[in-house]
Image: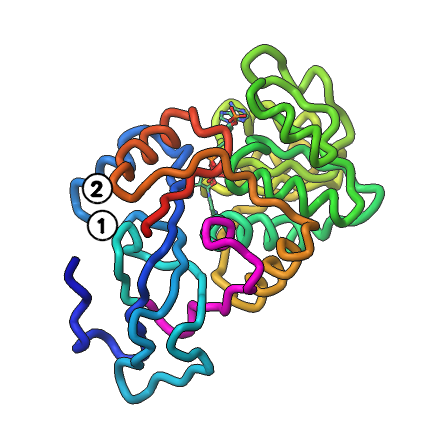
Amino acid sequence: MQRPSEKAVAARLVLQVLAGTVGELACPPAGRVREREARGAPIVVAAEGRFESGRKIGSDSKTSLREGDEVFGQVFGSFAEFALVPVKDLVKKPASLDFKIAAALPMPALTAWQAIIDTAKAKPGMRFLIHGASGGVGSFAAQFARWKGAEVAATASEPSFAFLKSIGVDPIIDYKRERFEEKLRDIDVVLDPLGGDTQARSWRVLKRGGMLITLIGEIDEEAARKAGVQAVDFGMEYDVDDLREIAGLVEQGVIKPHITTVLPLDQARQALDLNQQGKSHGKVVLEVR
Ligand SMILES: NC(=O)c1ccc[n+]([C@@H]2O[C@H](COP(=O)([O-])OP(=O)(O)OC[C@H]3O[C@@H](n4cnc5c(N)ncnc54)[C@H](OP(=O)(O)O)[C@@H]3O)[C@@H](O)[C@H]2O)c1
């Protein structure tokens, strides 16, 4: 495998990738993954690894990282054995964290953290409805809300129930058989990674003054106004300090990434299919080495 050229952009490091994940493109309309693949755009959302050489490329790169350090972070272009990574995007991996666990954190855990902790300000007495709570973002979101002492209801399908029970979600509503809006009322915050019909049915479960956070950039402001709730069109901002804090909680065993499948890099296609067809029921990790 060819290494990236050292004439690359300043303040980047050559990283040997050891694991990556599939997930951010899970729920959008079918076709988006294929479109991006056809254009050859990087579609990887997270990766972690170890410096291949530790050499800094470019004179303006300042880092306390050293050759051999184990790092993780969000890396575009990491369905590969080597990646060029901006130094500022890397965090030292806690020694006790497995690479596959660290790979599962950056995109979904940061998104969940900023939505549940920073935006919704989860605390005891609050009631959340997390749609897709077994998925990459949802599984962290449910755990962060529980960690802050809030109650969590969730929608998921049957293969995900055991995991959701284990993290204290109650009730769990099977979106394939039941209508959540017939079972829930007075919810403070809905996390919506789906939009469409799910969002349309979510307004009525919220209490007045509540909040709906959409992850997909689609929000019905008029419906929010009628329901008397706040509509938040959420976008994650990559933040290495948040990532360090999350990694600490995972290291302590407080938060558990929900990894259901680990595949070798040469099965990236199957990993994407599993995810896009809704058959992963949790995070799919790609083991690169
Ligand atoms: N705005 C941002 O900054 C941001 C950041 C990250 C991700 N996102 C977006 O967030 C979305 C979710 O990403 P993800 O990585 O968490 O996806 P994911 O890991 O594929 O999870 C999707 C989950 O949705 C569940 N699901 C499918 N249909 C459902 C339905 N009708 N009702 C309730 N649950 C349903 C599935 O549950 P079961 O397995 O139990 O069937 C699955 O686990 C994507 O659209 C992604 O693009 C946005």
Residue pictured at 28% horizontal, 55% vertical: 77
Of 97 and 76, nearer the camera is 97
- Spot the residue most to the top: 177
Dot 1 crowding, Cα within 10 Å, few <14, some 14–19, many 20+: few
- The residue lying at 50 percent from left, 28 percent from top is 281
Range covered by the magenta-colored residues: 85-102
Of residues 124 and 243, the one drawn nearer to the viewer in this rendering:
243
Question: In screen coordinates, is 86 left or right of 127?
Answer: left
- Near-viewer residue (276 or 90): 90
Q: Amino acid at mark 1?
A: Ala
Question: Which quadrant would residue 81 be assigned to in this image?
Answer: bottom left
Element type at mark 1: loop
The amino acid type, in three-letter code, at marker 2 is Glu
Picture layout, residue 48 above or below residue 126: below
Query: Where 21 falls versus 5 (above or below)?
Result: above
User: Is ligand 1 less than 8 Å from the beta carbon at label 2?
Assistant: no
Residue 257: percent from left, percent from top? 57, 44
Residue identified by numbered label 2: 37
Residue 85 versus residue 259: which sits nearer the camera?
259
In the image, 10: left or right of 18? left
Using the numbered discs, state the Cα–Cα distance from disc 2 to disc 1 in whole angstroms.
6 Å
Left or right: residue 55 compared with residue 96: left
**Residue at (77%, 37%) from the top-left corner?**
151
The magenta stretch spans residue 89: yes
Residue 135 on the magenta segment = no
Residue 200: name its quadrant.
Answer: top right
Whether label 2 touches label 1, CB < 8 Å:
yes
Label 1 belongs to which residue?
41
Figure check: 227 above or below 89: above
